[in-house]
Amino acid sequence: MAEISFPLPDLGEGLIEATVLEWLVAEGDQVERNQPMVEVETTKSSLELPSPQAGTVVRTHGEPGDTINVGDPLIVFEVPDDTAGIVGTVPKDEAPKRRVRLSANLDDD
Amino acid sequence: MTDVPHLTAHLFAPEGAETGRPVLLIHGFASSTELNWVTTGWVKYMNYAGRRVVAVDLPGHGQTPLPGSDDGSAEAPVPSLLRAGIRQAALEALGHAGDLAGAGPGDRTEATDGLVDVVGYSFGARLAWGLAADYPELVHRLCLGGAAATDPLADFDVPEARAVLASGDETEHMTDPMSDALLQMAQLVPSNDVDALLQVIEAVGAEPFVPGESVPQQPVLLVAGQRDELAETMPRLTELARVAGGAEELWLPARTHSNAVTSRAFKQAALEHFAS
């Protein structure tokens, strides 16, 4: 098993930090990808962040009321070794199956 | 005015099979069904749990204009009439229009006994408290969010607020900070009719909240953010309800009056309270 740590993502709009309001997962929980993970509040709004990863929650950072900077650790997952390292999928390098030929239709003017 | 006001009710049915009682949602001052319950995930949460949801827009809020606003004689109903209007709108929306024997407190039709569980937030909690006391048979269980045992709206100086608004000067503030915060809230949502909201406040002041006068006999769950200054007096409601029908409190860490509504812990606690 391996551990993957995720930082607080860039929430856009120039926000540099967020306050933890409510953890929706706890240490030891098995979570699915995209499952609501934590509700945080910024100076703009409060929002639920989805889990970026399926796995077992090892650690959460910040109690309700604590402020976390964008880029600082938010949550750590334990995942099987063969899934660690890469998040998401990488396009396979193979020959395209279908070709589209573009040609000018000279009759149509 | 003594007529029961007509309130717009919104009905949200679960996609799958319906389980449990319908849940009646009553929004807070300067809010609406949409803002208090739809965008915050309450309707979805309750629907997902199999509950049908009926939510009302209070007069001067959301899709309910003040009575008489079409002919220029707009007048906001006092809280007792609001409660009668909430009952009427909820019963009609739930298909019990025929069971509306009357609108006065104590009027009862057995067909609607224990018909709904109720959630009220802030001013809506104050109304829900009275609704459950006025119509003890209608309301099965009660959940109050961000509730105050005092009456922030009754202490509001409406003429002063009108003067501040008329000045057109954004740096002008009301003397009482709580009133000033309420006035800010009223102006926060662009679609709000501030003048209608001031009339609502005036009408509320005509029947100040005295929670000890009519205490719900149903089990009550009281929820508030730990940083909710408006709800600092909530424990007084808890004490009153505890000796009546039983009460529990839930304090949400780090939450304020404005961001406690989205809390999943709040929604979950309400659902568990209704199901127990």
Image (cartoon, helix red, strand yellow):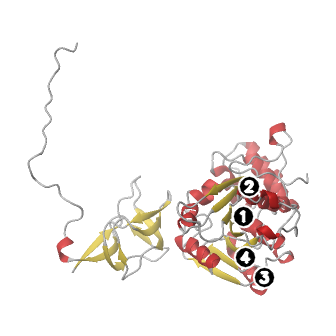
Q: Is residue A38 visible?
A: yes
Q: Earlier in the sequence, mark 1 or mark 2?
A: 2
Q: Are marks 2 and 3 on the same chain?
A: yes
C-alpha span from label 3 to label 4: 12 Å
Q: Are marks 1 and 2 in contact (CB under 8 Å)?
A: yes
At mark 3, the secondary structure is: helix
Above or below, B2 against B19 in this view is above
Which residue carries the number 1 mark? B124
Which residue carries the number 4 mark? B233
At mark 2, the secondary structure is: loop
The residue drawn where x is 77% and y is 68% is B112
Whole-percent x and y of residue B252? Answer: 57, 76
Which residue carries the number 3 mark? B240
Q: Are marks 2 and 3 in contact (CB under 8 Å)?
A: no
Above or below, B216 against B154 in this view is below
Q: Amino acid at mark 3?
A: Leu
Protein chain holding label 1: B
Whole-percent x and y of residue B60? Answer: 75, 50
C-alpha span from label 3 to label 1: 18 Å
Q: Are marks 1 and 2 on the same chain?
A: yes
Q: Amino acid at mark 4?
A: Thr
Protein chain holding label 3: B
Q: Are marks 3 and 1 in contact (CB under 8 Å)?
A: no
Q: How busy is the neighbourhood of tag 4: few (under 14 within 10 Å), some, or many (20 plus)?
A: some
Q: Is residue A84 visible?
A: no
- The mark found on residue B58 in the picture is 2
Task: Say whether residue B32 is left or right of residue B264.
Answer: right
